[in-house]
Image (tube, helix red, strand yellow):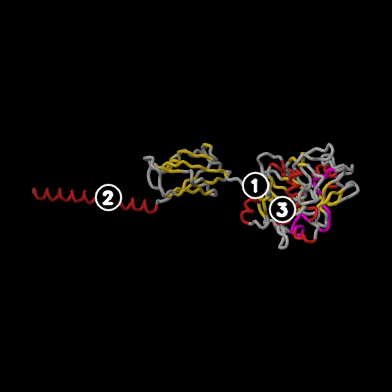
Amino acid sequence: MEFEVLKKNHLKRNIVIGVIAVLIISAIILNFTRAKYRVTQSIPLVNGTINYSLADLNIVALYIDGVAADELDSSKNYTLNTEQSTCTYKDGSTIQNLTLSYDSDTKTFTIAPYTAKGTKCTLYFNEYKEPTAAETIESIYLDNQNILAYDEANNLRYIGANPNNYVQFNDELWRIIGVFSEDSHGVIGQKLIKIIRSELLGSMAWDSASTNNWSTASLQTTLNGDYLNGSGSYASTGIKSDTARNMIATVTWKLGGTASYTSASNGLASHFYGYERGTTVYSGNPTTWMGKVALMYPSDYGYATSGGFTTNREACLAKELYNWDSSSFSDCKTNDWLYDSSTTQWTLTSRLGPGSVFLTNSSGSLGGAYNITPNSWGVRPSVYLKSFVSITGGTGTSANPYTLQ
C-alpha cells in the first residue's frame, strides 16, 4: 500500500515536472520567435495625441522644426530627423544600432530593433517644404556648371548660347536670368530669381518725353500699367492672369549709370554691375525705383556669356562691352543667350547725358542711345519672382520649360 502511494506521488511529481518543462520550452520557443521575427514595429502617427503607449513602445516627446508638439498634421508632409531622434530602454540606456524611419505616405513611424518593454522614443520631425525656385537653380548648378556661373557678387547666372533656362510664365516662354541676392533687388534676406520674356514684346520708345528717368518714363508706365494688368492694347500680350501677376515681386530696381564705358578700365560687365547699384545718375534722376516690371541691365547681358574656344568666358569678361562687336571677340556675343543679332534691345541703365540710355546693339556691342524719343528699339520685360515661387516640373528646354507654382 505504501509502495502504491509512493508510486502515485512519484507519478504526480513527474507530471508536474513535465508540465513545467513544457512551459519552459514553450517560453524559450516563444522568446526565440519574438526575437527572430518581431524586430520592427510600425506605429501610425496621424492627428490626435501621440503621447501614448502602444505595446512596449512609448513616444515620450515630439518636436516639429525644433518646437514641441502634440501631434502631426495629416495634411502635411514631414521628414524624420534620424540624427536627433533617440530611443532608450526602460533603464534609460540608449539603444545602440537603432534604425528609425518615417513613411510620409502612410504616416507611419518604424523602429528597429523593437526589443524591450518600456522602450521610450523622442522624435524630431521637420515639415517638408517644396524648395524655392532659387534653391532648385542652385542645386542644378552643383550638377551642371556648364550653363550656370557665379559672378563676383555671388549671383548665379545662366550662361551660354542657349542654356536650358526656359520657364513657362504667363502662358508664354520666358527665360531665367539667374538667382540674385538682396544687393540687386532690396528684399532683405531673400534670394529671388529674375526672368525675362523670351521674345520681344515689340519695339517702342524708352520715353516719349525724351528723358532718361525710368521712374517717369513712358515705357515704365506702360509696362507697369496696361501690360502688367493685361488691359487696353495689352489685353492679349500683357500679364494675363492673377496667378502670374501674384508671382511678381515688388522690388527696388537700381538706376545708377555712368558716362565712361569704352575701355577695359571702365566698361566691363563687372564695372556696369557697380554702376547700376551706385548713386551716380543724370541731373536730378532718382537712384532707385520700386516696382514690378523693368528691363535687363547691361551687366545681365555681359555676364550671360560663356565665351568659346577662341575667347573664353574669362577673356570676354575682361573685354569692354562696347567692343564686343569686334571680330576677334565674336565668341563673346555668339555664346550669350541675351544677344539678338536681329534687333537692338533697350536696357534699364541710363548714360549720364540728356535723354541717353544704354542698349545692346544687334552687332553685339553695348552703346548709349541719344534721342531716345524717336528711336523705337526692342523691349523684353523683366521681373523678379517672389521667394516662395517654386519650380514644379519641366527640364528647362524650350520644348519642355520649367513650370512654376
**Secondary structure found at label 1:** loop
The quarter of the picture where residue 344 lies is bottom right
**Secondary structure found at label 2:** helix
What is the tally of numbered marks visible in this picture? Answer: 3
| Three-letter amino acid code at the position of disc 3 | Val
| Three-letter amino acid code at the position of disc 2 | Ile
Residue 17, image x and y in percent? 21, 49
Residue drawn 51% across and 37% down?
Answer: 70
Q: Does the magenta stretch include residue 344?
A: yes
Residue under circle 2? Answer: 24
Residue drawn 82% across and 39% down?
Answer: 215
Q: Is residue 262 at least partly visible in the picture?
A: yes
How crowded pointer 2 is (Cα within 10 Å; few <14, some 14-19, many 20+) is rated as: few
Residue drawn 52% across and 36% down?
Answer: 68
116 with respect to 387 (left or right): left
Q: Give the range drawn in magenta.
A: 332-352
How crowded pointer 3 is (Cα within 10 Å; few <14, some 14-19, many 20+) is rated as: many
**Dots 1, 3 in contact, CB < 8 A:** no
393 with respect to 204 (left or right): left
| Three-letter amino acid code at the position of disc 1 | Thr
Residue 167's disc number: 3
Residue 369's disc number: none
Q: How far apart are marks 2 and 3 (CA)?
A: 71 Å
The quarter of the picture where residue 255 lies is top right
Given the current orientation, which residue lies at the most extreme right position?
374
Q: How far apart are marks 1 and 3 (CA)?
A: 14 Å
Residue under circle 1? Answer: 132
Residue 382, image x and y in percent? 77, 48
Tag in front: 1 or 2? 1
Q: Nearer the viewer, residue 400 or 18?
A: 400
